[in-house]
Amino acid sequence: MRKLSILFVILLATQIAQCKEFSIANSMRPKKNSDGALDKTRILLGPGIGVNAFNRGFAFNLNPSLAYAFTDNFYAGFSLGYSYFQQSTDYKNPVSNLDEKFRYKIPSYSASVFARYIIANMIIIGVEPEINNTKVYTDRFFNSSGQLNVESRRLSVSSFLVGGGYCQRQSDIGHLFFMAMYDLRQNPNAARYYESLDIRLGWMIPLFNQR
């Protein structure tokens, strides 16, 4: 009897595994209309914002995006963005000998492609290669009154972001998400991402009515 029970459990587990494999494979197939064309109701529009606070500074960004839901759990697309980074530093005025403060201000523009996957309708993970056109400070000098001044130029800097977070379904493919992203490249010129996490809140909305 014990051997039969063990055999039954093994057979049951095998059937469950096969069902799961079929379900996963089925969910990864791109959704198409009956004529074979991609389904426009699976196009997602994604207004998004990001914030980051750290020692004596902050950053925020706006990232509108457009994506296609290849399955109910997987989508990919592209994003355009604007970000603003500011950080304060103290220095001593060599003329007045007083402590003063200078604020580094870095506006940046970005373009990226991304892919995200939703697990168990509540966990979202993603990757996002990105190119940033940003301001880079090249020199520091003091003027005649002893105040700090800087010279800068524009520079293109690449990033490779990975991360994950929480997701809340609004429809089959529409959802809210809260993610923390980390730049694997850690280029100091990508000030917004350097040695910090980028916190993002977004909403992926079906652009057309779903049938």
Image (cartoon, rainbow, N blue to C red):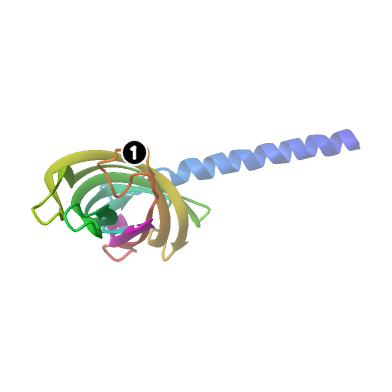
Residue at the (32%, 58%) spot, across then down: 57
Q: Residue at x 32, y 59 (%)?
A: 58
Given residues 39 and 203, the one toward you in this image is 203
Density class for disc 1 (Cα within 10 Å; few <14, some 14-19, many ≥20) is some
Point 37% across, 37% down: residue: 184
**Within the image, what quadrant is residue 174 found in?**
bottom left
Quadrant in the picture for residue 127: top left
Residue under label 1, please give it. Answer: 186
Residue 101 lies left or right of residue 166; in this view the side is left
Quadrant in the picture for the C terminus: bottom left
Indicate whether residue 44 is drawn in magenta.
yes
Q: Name the amino acid, label 1.
A: Gln
User: Is residue 151 or residue 21 the one in the foreground?
Assistant: 151
Magenta span of residues: 41-57
Which residue ends up furthest to the left in the rendered image?
144
**For residue 4, side relative to residue 17 (left or right):** right
Query: Which of 192 and 44 lies nearest the eye of the viewer?
Result: 192
**Residue 126 visible, this angle:** no
Residue 175 in the image, given as x and y percentages of width and height = 40, 62
